[in-house]
Amino acid sequence: MPRRRLPLSLTLAAALTLGGGLAASGALFLGVSHLECDNMALAFAQRADERVAAVRQGMDQAVEVLTVTNQLFARGEPVSRQQFADFTSALLERHRFIQAFNYHRVVRAEDRAAAEAALQQVRPNTIFTELRPEGQVPAPMRGRYHVVDYLEPMAGNEAAFGLNVSQNAEVMGALDIARGSGRAAATGLFALAQDATPQPSFEMILPILDKDGAMTGDTAVIIRGNELVRSSLAGAGLLESNDIFVSVYASEHADASKRLLSTGPTQVSHDHFLADWLMPDGPAVHSTVLRIAGRPWRIDVAAATRPFLADHMASTALLVGGILITLLSTAFVQASGQRARKVQQLVRQRTADLRRTNRRLVEDMIARERAEKALQQSEQRFRQLVSMSSDWYWEQDAALRFTMVTGAFTEKTGVPVDTVLGKTRWEFQPDLLETEAGRSHIAQVKAHEPFANLEYKTVDEFGDTRWFCVNGQPVFDETGTLAGYRGTGSDITERKLTEQRVHHVAQHDVLTGLPNRSLLQDRLGQAIAYATRSGYPVWVMLIDLDRFKFVNDSMGHKAGDVLLMTVAARLRGSLRDTDTVARLSGDEFVVILSEHAEEPLRPEIVQRVMDSVAQPVMLGTKEFFVTCSIGVAVYPSEGTPADSLIEHADIAMYSAKKMGRNNFQFYTPAMNEESLERVRIEGALRNALERNEFVLHYQPQVDLKSGRIVGMEALIRWNHPELGMVPPVRFIGIAEETGLIVQIGAWVMRTACAQNKAWQDAGLGKLRVAVNLSARQFGAADLIASLESVLNDTGLDPDCLEIELTESLFMSDVTPAVELLHRMKSLGVNLSIDDFGTGYSSLSYLSRFPIDVLKIDRSFVADITHDVNDAAIVTSIIALAHNLKLAVIAEGVETAEQLDYLRTHGCDEMQGYYFSKPLPAADFEQMLRQGRCLALPAPEDEAFAASAA
């Protein structure tokens, strides 16, 4: 009888084994795949952040370069083209992405010719130009220009020299943003005028304001956007990458027309349907929008397309292995079932077979549970490592000693791994025990808590200081007992060095390297706290150089900078290392001295500082001697609170200057009274014009031949409601220093001309009124226009106005002064030199000045009757003036003997108390109506006097 064949079908157990195995394999595959996707996304995000940070750092460097360049002009001191070139050359060498540095000067229409002439001295045939659709054309006449005046480098950028950007909406819009925010602002992308082919470039700009807040120009940096991004990425070692691409746009959107750089495609797709299902949102593209320099900058980082198996090898291997194991288990279960049915049919031992089958199923379930538990532990460890992914990994045992350090630790840190293994972190780095952060870390790990961002420094095998940042999490075994720690570490040395450099720049003067005002206040606070604790005094010295302005004017600001650096070095060398030397502003320095038990403070220290400054200084080929005036404030002392030390030292310094300079004074409360008086005068002076408190007195000028009044000098007086009639000596100097003299002088000019015209219209004769012109008025750009306006508005004939000038107004720079004097003379007014003989002018220049009158200073007139030297000087001035066809007026004539001497030697006119003191307008008018004249000797008396002489 033939054997009966069993049908080929799966038993229930085999079917369950097959289905359960496939389901478990699929679930494991999906779980591990998602973990791989999470790892990919985390790694991509970290790499994208690195590129965004590199681009941000490049942008910040561009802003920092512009800010530093702007500070060159913001100090308010003139900057020469050579200084500008020297300053920017190093920056151009360091930052290759910079096309050019610009200084835009604001030029008014009337100054265009002079400005173009200045440009042509640098580059012949240069004129103002503008960019138009048809190209670069000469700039038409406009009310104001915004011209590229300084340009570095010139080579390759010649087309931009003299370019007027006031019509460029992008540039002026960015300038408005920068002026409103006080920070650098960037334009949109544009094509450079100096490039034959367009390239994505933009301009960063920052205004320059004078002390009144008016804009005199701006500094700008032309940046090649493509090179800026490339150099930023290349500097971080992120440019050459085949699996990740970067695109940067000068916009919030991915606008191709505003793209600075693209290193590859901005959109990618997966090459497998499973990748799209497992990770539908990326890591394809990571987009970030930064706001730098007043504009948005979009940065897209895209991952390159990769084969599915390249990123999912582990999950795929797990899936294939699970399927194979499932199939083998299914075959085994199927075979066992068939054998059971065969035995049942043959020996009817179904019960025994069922028990064996159940026992196998229980064993399989136990094994499956163990496998799942091991898988969960592996998954947890994997997630922890992924979440802390960084430069290197480390592990510690339960005693917190390092057992493993990976990730090329030695290459990245310069510290051999052998010096770390087997030690705790505080054994490897003992300094942790001395810092608050280190003690907090030790407390955390002893409490079995995770920690993050622990920063500490160490010294590598080359002796260099390195900074690390570490993170860690505790690891526990199945019973909850601490098994150790795992974590990551990063080298943050570059970041720390950058922070230190930024901190140093923020608290130190750029030119001298001394502490600036910010750090000075901190050091002063520490010194005061020490004095309070110890009871020892603190001295604050304010040092002001006496002849610094002369060096700047005669040698230029570059020599002035050399002098400041030399003085700074001498101050540091003459004091202790523990003393603070800071630069306050300009040519002012502050020194903080703290007394110690073994080193008492004495005035000899101040004298030593003065002697060190007074040593000769070689500036170029010339030797200069510069002295200083020092004010000293002591804390604690009566009348000097801690927050007023610098202010009181400043008051004492001004007192030293008033005593002849090159000396020092300690502050006393009496000095403060004088300072308060000055502040009171200055405050009241600002409102005096509005309140109509100024009045003019007129002192007659008398012809020494006829005795008649031929003119008068207008002298200002201040009729203060509380102080009474304030003489000019109390307020003119303050008005000069504060700049109020310009408004006051304009009021004097207009009032004196109007009064003279009124007297002429009243039939009191054609007189000449003399008005003093201050140094600030003489240097004003609108001087000629204001004189024309006064003459036109008042209707006074120009020959009835005499402008009095002192020698010091024009002797510092003779050539432009001669031109300005000729322009004033062309109006028809008379010009006189006041206080002649007291200045330092050269007689060789006198013939070049279009002067009408010389006024002999009262200091010579006072002693002409009994001082042979003064008499000789007066005689020489009269002879010199007459030889040059000039009239002579003597001031301060108070006696008949002085008058006789002047008449005898041919002086033309006089003024002084002998005839009349300065009178109010009403009294002077009364004198004119009375026809008062000077009593002169009879002709025979004159003849006798001449023969006697």
Image (cartoon, helix red, strand yellow):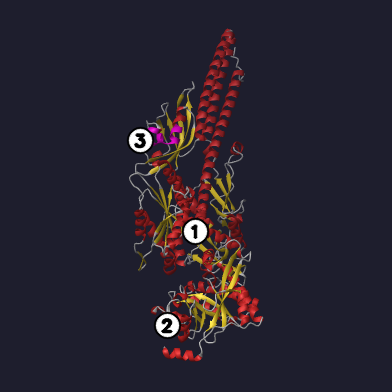
The residue identified by callout 2 is 876
* Residue 147 picture location, percent across and down: 56, 67
Quadrant where the C terminus lies? bottom left
In the figure, residue 844 lies in which quadrant?
bottom left
Residue 377, horizontal then vertical, whole percent: 51, 26
The residue sitting at 59% across, 23% down in the picture is 20
Q: Residues within 10 Å of mark 3 (few under 14, many from 20)?
A: few
Residues packed near mark 2 inside 10 Å, few (<14), some (14 to 19) or many (20 plus): few
Q: Crowdedness of circle 1 by 10 Å Cα count: few (<14), some, many (20+)?
A: few
Q: Secondary structure at mark 3?
A: helix
Nearest to viewer (mark 3 / mark 2): 2
Q: In the image, which residues are magenta? A: 426-441
Q: In the image, 150: left or right of 595?
A: right
Type of amino acid under label 3: Thr
| Residue 326 is at least partly visible in this image | yes
Residue 173 x, y percent position in the rendering: 61, 60
User: To which residue does mark 1 refer?
Assistant: 674
Looking at marks 2 and 1 on the same chain, the residue that comes earlier in the sequence is marked by 1
- Residues marked 2 and 1 touching at CB (< 8 Å): no
Residue marked by disc 3: 419
Seen from the viewer's position, the closer of residues 271 and 471 is: 471
> In the picture shown, does residue 480 fall above or below 670?
above
* Labels 2, 1: front one: 1
